[in-house]
Image: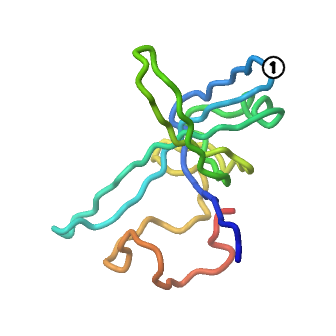
């Protein structure tokens, strides 16, 4: 039996300038705040957008290199794992945070003025009832439609 799988795949936009710092041991670590968007029809049949915010952590030389080119609005593909950390705050209360530790980071382009990813070859946003915001369902697409 398999031991388990902890894998996260995200495509979204950098929401603020990434923060590069060093640990006490001198290792570089960068924190990226990334937004992913979902569009679905609500119970009244109106299109609704929902944004989720994620904290991405990148370590080592990759963090140093990415810190030179990432900026707010950059469109990214992230592959990594979920990790929860615990610490005590100033009042001694236990605090927790869940982050995505990146294994792969691919630049997809810079966000354009219309909120897109700066790519003109992708499919348009959904415009009919066939999109329900969930997974599954078929669709007419081929490998050329996939942005990565």
Residue 92 in percent (x, y) is at: 43, 19
Which residue is pictured at 50% across the width and 37% down the height? 97
Q: Eyeballing the image, is 27 above or below 145?
A: above
Residue 85 in percent (x, y) is at: 56, 37
Which residue is pictured at 73% across the width and 21% down the height? 23
Residue 13, quarter of picture: top right
Of residues 25 and 121, the one drawn nearer to the viewer in this rendering:
25
Of residues 112 and 133, the one drawn nearer to the viewer in this rendering:
133
Which residue is pictured at 53% across the width and 33% down the height? 86
Residue 54 in percent (x, y) is at: 51, 43
Which residue sits furthest right? 61
- How crowded pointer 1 is (Cα within 10 Å; few <14, some 14-19, many 20+) is rated as few
Residue carrying label 1: 26
Which residue sits furthest top? 90
Which residue sits furthest left? 44
Residue 83, quarter of picture: top right
67 lies left or right of 125: right
64 lies left or right of 78: right
Callout 1: SS: loop
Residue 30, quarter of picture: top right
Quadrant showing the C terminus: bottom right
Residue 111 in percent (x, y) is at: 55, 44
Quadrant showing the N terminus: bottom right
32 lies left or right of 68: left
91 lies left or right of 79: left
């Amino acid at each position: 039996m398999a031991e388990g799988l902890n894998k996260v795949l995200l495509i979204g936009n950098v929401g603020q300038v990434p923060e590069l710092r060093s640990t006490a041991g001198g290792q570089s670590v960068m924190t990226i705040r990334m937004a992913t968007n979902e569009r679905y029809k609500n119970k009244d049949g109106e299109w609704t957008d929902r944004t989720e915010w994620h904290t991405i952590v990148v370590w080592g030389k990759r963090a140093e290199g990415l810190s030179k080119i990432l900026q707010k609005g950059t469109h990214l593909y992230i592959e990594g794992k979920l990790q929860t950390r615990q610490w005590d705050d100033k009042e001694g209360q236990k605090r927790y945070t869940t982050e995505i530790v990146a294994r792969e980071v691919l630049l997809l382009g810079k966000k354009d003025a219309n909120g897109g990813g700066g790519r003109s070859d992708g499919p348009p946003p959904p415009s009919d009832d066939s999109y329900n915001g969930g997974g599954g369902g078929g669709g007419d697409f081929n490998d050329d439609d996939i942005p990565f």
